[in-house]
Image (cartoon, rainbow, N blue to C red):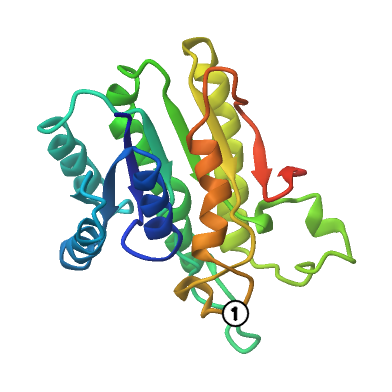
Amino acid sequence: MRKVLITGANKGLGFELAKYLLQQGYFVYMGCRNAVTGQRSVDTLQAEGLVHCELIEIDVSDQTSVTRAAEAYGRKENVLDILINNAGILGRRQDPSQPLNVADVRHVFETNFFGAIMTTEAFLPFLEQSKLAVIENITSDLASLTKHQDENWILYKAKSISYGPSKTALNAYTVALAFQYKDKGFKINCVTPGWTSTDFNGHSGGKSAAENCINLAKYAMLDENGPTGQYFGEAGAMPW
């Protein structure tokens, strides 16, 4: 049974992705910042008969928390097959009267970018023991610099100096990491779920998390012939 760690797994896309992978026969460690709400999510899934899941308490923006999470995982397992860096924050919304500043940018990058790097580095020793290691970084359509140049794009006006750039940086990290571990057979990609109605965006529309998690799961369940170093969305390859 392949082992999966999903950060930000207590609700929304993370929770639905955990549920879907459990249904496919994976053992899922649900990475959650809050142990109480995280355990509640684990209990919910186990009550549905999806018993192969456990809580890993982790705040990806806190190095001490990430280190402790890796140590806790090491007391349970020697191998991690799939890491899904899903935890992310939107940050403060753009306000014409109070423009975003460097503090806002740093706040978002700590979770969306540096958090993913810290988590990956902490769990790489376990991934390196897998026969087929997969790292999936959950990104956004807003990471695409190409799409941001298209005035006809539905999200053309959705520009900020924090959230979108944090995901663009995550994409760049994904490319570099995939190149570094290509010869070891790692499959490392960034995948956007597309417009999803969750607490994250105030349920502003789009498909449900249960619907959009299926495409995310596809890139978590890659085999040895799967792609690496790529950027994917609902329709396949995304423009950088």
What residue is shown at x 25% (from left), y 24% (from top)?
79
Instruction: Classify residue 19 as left or right of residue 58.
Output: right
Instruction: Classify residue 32 as left or right of residue 107.
Output: left
User: SS class of the residue under badge 1?
Assistant: loop
The quadrant where residue 126 appears: top left
Q: Is residue 138 visible?
A: no
Give the residue type that dot 1 points to.
Ser
The residue lying toward the viewer, choosing from 155 and 64, is: 155
What residue did someone put label 1 on? 204
Classify 155 as above or below 174.
below
Which image quadrant: the N terminus? top left
* Residue, far front: 49
The residue lying toward the viewer, choosing from 109 and 151, is: 151
The residue lying toward the viewer, choosing from 5 and 208, is: 208
In this figure, what is the number of numbered marks? 1
What residue is shown at x 64% (from left), y 71% (from top)?
206
Q: Position of residue 183 (x, y in %)?
A: 52, 10
Instruction: Classify residue 99 as left or right of residue 80.
Output: right
Q: Is residue 163 visible?
A: yes
What residue is shown at x 83% (from left), y 64% (from top)?
153
Q: Position of residue 157 (x, y in %)?
A: 77, 72
What residue is shown at x 28% (from left), y 22% (from top)?
125
Q: Position of residue 74 (x, y in %)?
A: 15, 30
Which image quadrant: the C terminus? top right
How busy is the neighbourhood of tag 1: few (under 14 within 10 Å), some, or many (20 plus)? few
Classify 235 as above or below 8.
above
Classify 36 as above or below 85.
below
* Residue, far bottom: 97
* Residue, far top: 183
